[in-house]
Image (spheres, rainbow, N blue to C red):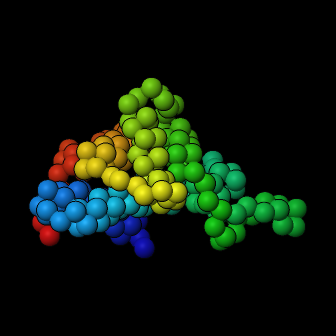
Amino acid sequence: MTGFEIDDFALSLLEESKRFLEKVEDHGDHFANEAYLHSALLLAFSSLEAHVNAIAEEFVARPELSVHEKGMILEQEVRLENGEFVRRPVLRMARLEDRISFLYVKFGRSIDRSMPHWSRLADAVILRNQLTHPKEKVTLTKAGVGRAIQAVVDTLDAMCQAIYKRPFPAAGRGLQSSLSF
């Protein structure tokens, strides 16, 4: 995918997430509402990952990044081969929060962890992890998923402001989706 294609895809995932959240009010079926909440939460994080991946791809060609830094932001393995470190196209997962922090600091400015979006993102990650790594039945609420989606939007807005010196384009709509399915 090109840079524009991944940006469009990342944004469409976010809009789908917000639309599924909106649909919770439209439907009285408990099972449908649960599915909408699950979808909304997971799509919001898919969008965040896609946006972070797009930013990482954009900056990976910069000469000031070491091979280890490139490996971390692209989630690729770095190995010592023939006396030098090389990236290999083997998945080496890194914490999403670490990738965001690195991009923020390396290409933007220092992080103020007291900013509200950081704690809201941490809460959203916990909620996402409860759903993706369940140890018991997870009961989501519309308000809780809404806060998680807003945390994603706020995090993307903070990243755009720090890195690109402009707001995240979708931030102004908050939780209102541009979709109508």
**Residue farthest to the bottom?**
1
The residue at 41%/46% (across/down) is: 124
Q: Quadrant of the N terminus?
A: bottom left
Res. 29 visible in picture = yes
Q: Is residue 156 above or below residue 9?
A: above
The residue at 14%/56% (across/down) is: 25
Q: Is residue 169 left or right of residue 43?
A: left
The residue at 19%/58% (across/down) is: 24
Q: Is residue 103 left or right of residue 50?
A: right
Residue sitting nearer the eye, 50 or 104: 50
Q: Is residue 54 above or below residue 142?
A: below
Res. 40 visible in picture = no
Where residue 71 sits, quadrant-wise, is bottom right
Q: Quadrant of the C terminus?
A: bottom left
Q: Percent position (x, y) of residue 130? A: 47, 53
Q: Is residue 118 above or below residue 22?
A: above
Residue sitting nearer the eye, 27 or 67: 27
Q: Percent position (x, y) of residue 91? A: 63, 67
Q: Is residue 78 left or right of residue 43?
A: right
Q: Is residue 33 left or right of residue 106?
A: left
The residue at 51%/31% (across/down) is: 110
Residue sitting nearer the eye, 119 or 52: 119
Q: Percent position (x, y) of residue 29? A: 18, 65
Q: Percent position (x, y) of residue 27? A: 14, 63
Residue sitting nearer the eye, 77 or 28: 28
Where residue 51 sits, quadrant-wise, is bottom left
